[in-house]
Image: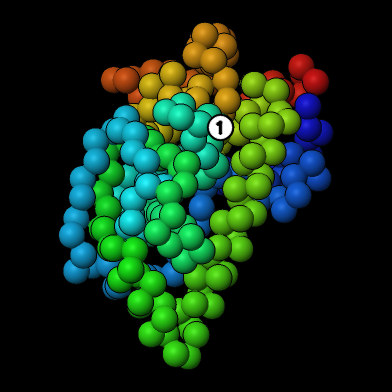
Amino acid sequence: MAALLPIMSASPTSVFTQAFSSDRIFASVPWLLEPDDQAFEAMFMKCPQKIMPAHEFFFFGVQRQVFYIESGLIATCFGRGDTFDRMASLFRPGNLLGAPKAVLHPGKDMPLMALALSPVSVRVMEEAAFIKLLEQDSDLKLKLKYLMSLAKHHERQIEGLLVCGVDPLPLRLATLLIVLLELVPEDADAAWKRLTIDARVSEVAELIHATRPAVSKVLNAWEKQGLLRRQDGRLELACDFPVRIRELLMQVE
């Protein structure tokens, strides 16, 4: 298990980045992509809107479209058949989904899958139209902004793949929950932090390359210890979850 370092800050992201040692290549938050540049939002605002319910799978690798996420959370993976196997990224509002494929592999089918972890609203632009907008960027400002986004996304994707490929299950699950805390609105007085996703236990297991029974066993143990609880089908984490789970994982090293 990864060695743990002292925690110097109370925010979920900084707790994560300081809690785990140099096993992390970039010391960045796994999976959760930073929003892309705001310039892309204006490009998509007049595009058709699409609403997806929670738990919906879709194969965006065979679509000739780019999606701008307005609300909700989407997990992606490199699919094998119709199996969601090992998460690659978490896309949040402000992210572009399908843009790298459109730029690097236009017109090509690729085994790219996505899962809506909550109700999702996206704006949809045809692949050819997106490429044309980039080609019209004569001063390269938009292209450079997108290149910077891709570089940052790449770091978080690599970290996430390392988590799923190297870390034991309790650490993988704790990492995912701490990352999801990043999306919870700040409330200093709240004793519990309600996660904003609607993911089922089976879906959580798929995200971190585990089985449903194994994830259920760990969640049940943490619930008995007061680290989390389930309310109306959603997980709520104790406000001090990052610190307490760190201490718990240290005990089992």
Q: Residue at x 54, y 78 (%)?
A: 144
Residue 52 in picture, x, y percent from top left: 24, 41
Q: Is residue 14 left or right of residue 134?
A: right
Note whether 43 is above or below 216 in the view shown.
below
Closer to the camera, 200 or 190? Answer: 200
Tell me if I can see residue 239 in this picture: no
Around disc 1, counting alpha carbons within 10 Å, would you say few (fewer than 14), some (14 to 19), or many (20 or more)? many
Q: Which residue is mark 1?
A: 86
Q: Residue at x 76, y 49 (%)?
A: 25
Image quadrant holding the C terminus, namely top right
Residue 31 in picture, x, y percent from top left: 55, 44
Q: Residue at x 43, y 49 (%)?
A: 109
Note whether 209 is above or below 103 in the view shown.
above
Where residue 55 sits, quadrant-wise, is top left
Image quadrant holding the N terminus, namely top right
Residue 192 in picture, x, y percent from top left: 43, 29
